[in-house]
């Protein structure tokens, strides 16, 4: 995913939650982790990490495993990247976890 922050970010954390019946539940092991290792240049070829500079384009590449402890369920995944002052980007997608 391409992102272009409107302000500088010294660090970037992942806010990955599953929303089930309107209740947000953090994905264990992924919620609140550093997103810096997954930040690449605008072309997505070279890892650049953090900090992120305002107005510069970056590519975020990441995925995570569905652990056996996750229930079979339809849900919405909320995925945000930001710091304590706010998000640089966030999105939601419908998903289905199958065992």
Image (cartoon, helix red, strand yellow):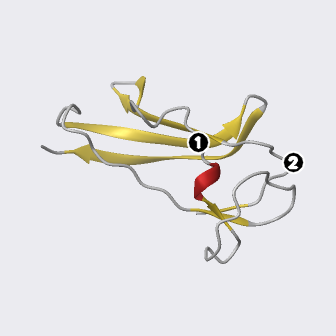
Up the image or down, 74 lies above or below 35; here it is above
Is residue 54 shown left or right of residue 74? right
Q: Nearer the viewer, residue 68 or 72?
A: 68
Label 1: few (<14), some or many (≥20) within 10 Å? many
Q: Position of residue 24 (x, y in %)?
A: 44, 25
Name the residue located 16 percent from the left edge and 45 percent from the top edge: 98
Q: Which mark is residue 80?
A: 1
Q: Position of residue 33 (x, y in %)?
A: 55, 37
What is the secondary structure assignment of the residue under circle 1? Answer: strand
The residue wearing badge 2 is: 7
What is the secondary structure assignment of the residue under circle 2? Answer: loop
Q: Position of residue 66 (x, y in %)?
A: 27, 44
Up the image or down, 83 lies above or below 52; here it is above
Is residue 91 shown left or right of residue 27? right
Q: Please state, as top left, top right, bottom left or bottom right, where the C terminus lies in the image.
A: top left
Q: Please state, as top left, top right, bottom left or bottom right, where the N terminus lies in the image.
A: bottom right
Label 2: few (<14), some or many (≥20) within 10 Å? few
Disc 1 versus disc 2: distance between alpha carbons? 16 Å
Is residue 20 shown left or right of residue 82? left
């Amino acid at each position: 995913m391409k992102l272009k922050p409107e302000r500088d970010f010294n660090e970037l954390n992942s806010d990955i939650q599953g929303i089930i019946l309107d209740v947000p539940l953090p994905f264990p092991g992924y919620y609140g982790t550093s997103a810096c290792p997954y930040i690449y240049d605008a072309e997505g070829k070279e890892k650049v990490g953090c900090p992120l500079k305002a107005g510069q384009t970056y590519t975020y590449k990441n995925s995570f495993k569905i652990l056996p402890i996750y229930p079979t369920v339809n849900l919405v995944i909320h995925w945000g990247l930001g710091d304590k002052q706010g998000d640089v980007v966030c999105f939601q997608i419908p998903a289905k976890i199958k065992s």
